[in-house]
Amino acid sequence: MKSKWISVMFAALVLAGCGSDEAEKGEKKEQVAGQESAAKEKVDNSKANLAKIFAEGSYKADVMAIGLPADLNEKMEKITETMQASLAKNEAWYLETVGGLAEGEILPYDEKLGITENEYKFLLEANEHFQLGKVGESDITITTADEQPTIQNPTASIVKELTISADGNTLTSDLGDLTYVEEIVASDAQKITGKWNGHFYRMGGENTKQVLQISIGQLEDSKKKVIYKELFEEGQEKKEEILMF
């Protein structure tokens, strides 16, 4: 059975945002827009304030997935299967070519990929077709002690309990402690989710058998909370879960 949604990397959603210019103009509508923009800029999105945006209470969270609509998903799978089969036959060429690419450089099209140039272009531009879809619901309870909110999610597929330190430097989960990595800044590039601000944490590294990554924050307009969890374990497929509430 083919699912309407296929999970993809969340990294594309957390690109750094671009600054916006504010200019005073005579028309009332433009003045209002400027005031709204200024109000947004005054919101404290620092990690020191992260714990404060999670108020105590019970919430119904939407379990989300990022992916392609069914028709494009099927097209993507067929192209990917064909390309993987071809790369298996041309493994030496592939490894040599990839090894010669600079960091961030895209693999150029070649007939050895086993697909047409238009099909390869479709793969490279697939992110333009990604959508965010609801795939379920989950109950969340938030309690606070010593200015540290604990987010309990008993039915979660990965982390069932998460505590945010008062200063935002650490996340404590039932799988272990995560340390702060970097800030997520709202950006026009966040087309799939809508603009959101937050922070990125990680437990483990290159030489560990288990790596847990959590991106957490809130949408700029609706103020809905966003929690994205990724779990990498040696010898197993990556697990991930996106919650919005």
Image: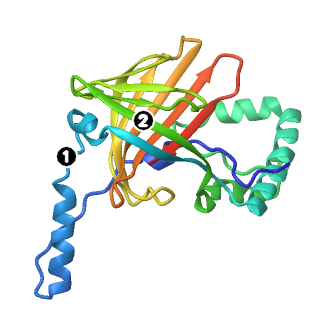
Residue 239 shown left or right of residue 18 in the figure: right
Query: For mark 1, what is the residue?
Result: 44
In the picture as drawn, the residue positioned furthest to the bottom comes out as 27
Counting labels gives 2
Question: Sequence-wise, which precedes: disc 2 or disc 1?
Answer: 1
Q: Secondary structure at mark 2?
A: strand
Q: Residue at x 70, y 27 (%)?
A: 237
Instruction: Give the residue displayed 88% in from the left and 39% down from the top.
Output: 85
Read off the residue under disc 2: 141
Residue 189 lies in quadrant = bottom left
The image position of residue 106, as x and y in percent, is 60, 46
* Residue 41: quadrant of the picture: bottom left
Q: Nearer the viewer, mark 2 or mark 1?
A: 2
Question: Is residue 117 something one can see in this rendering?
Answer: no
Query: Which residue type does callout 1 highlight?
Result: Asp
Q: Nearer the viewer, residue 173 or 99?
A: 173
Q: Residues within 10 Å of mark 1 (few under 14, many from 20)?
A: few
Q: Give the structural element (helix, strand or loop) at label 1.
A: loop
Instruction: State the image coordinates of residue 38 (x, y, percent, origin top left).
Output: 16, 63
- Amino acid residing under circle 2: Thr
Is residue 93 shown above or below 34?
A: above
Q: Residue at x 17, y 72 (%)?
A: 34
The part of the image, by quadrant, that contains residue 39 is bottom left
Foreground pick, 52 / 186:
52
